[in-house]
Amino acid sequence: MFTVRPYKEEDAAACGDCFYEGFFSCSVDQNDKILLRDYAQILIEKCNFTYVAETEDHQVVGFI
C-alpha cells in the first residue's frame, strides 16, 4: 500500500534513487547520486505539481 502526498524538498535524494533504480543497472558512486538528486530536483521545479508515492514506513518509492 502506498500513500501519495505532495513533494517536499527533503524528498529530492529519494527521488534521485528512484531514477537510478528505474533506469540504470550499473554501479554508482556518491557523485552519481548527487547528479541524479539534482536532476530530479530540476525536473520537479519545472513541473506545476509533483507528488511522491510513499510506503507505510515513509520510504519514497516513486514520484509523479
Image (cartoon, helix red, strand yellow):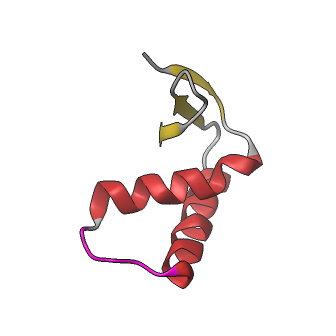
Range shown magenta:
25-29
Whole-percent x and y of residue 10? 74, 49
Residue drawn at (47%, 81%), measured in percent from left and top?
29
Residue drawn at (64%, 54%), measured in percent from left and top?
12
Whole-percent x and y of residue 8? 73, 41
- Residue 24 vs 6, above or below: the answer is below
Residue at the right extreme, as displayed: 9
Asked if residue 30 is among those painted magenta in the image, a careful observer would answer no
Q: Of residues 22 and 56, which is closer to you in this image? A: 56
Residue at the left extreme, as displayed: 25
Q: Of residues 27 and 42, which is closer to you in this image? A: 27
Whole-percent x and y of residue 33? 53, 72
Residue drawn at (56%, 34%), measured in percent from left and top?
52
Quadrant the N terminus occupies:
top left
Q: Of residues 29 and 42, which is closer to you in this image? A: 29
Residue drawn at (62%, 69%), measured in percent from left and top?
38
In the picture, measured across the screen, residue 36 lies left or right of residue 26, that is right
Asked if residue 28 is among those painted magenta in the image, a careful observer would answer yes
Looking at the image, how many numbered discs can be counted on the residues?
0
Which of the 4 quarters of the picture holds residue 28?
Answer: bottom left
In the picture, measured across the screen, residue 36 lies left or right of residue 6, that is left
- Residue 29 vs 12, above or below: the answer is below
Q: Is residue 63 visible in the rendered structure shown here?
A: no
Q: Is residue 26 visible in the rendered structure shown here?
A: yes
Residue at the top extreme, as displayed: 1
Which of the 4 quarters of the picture holds residue 31?
Answer: bottom right
State the predominant SS element of the stretch in magenta. loop
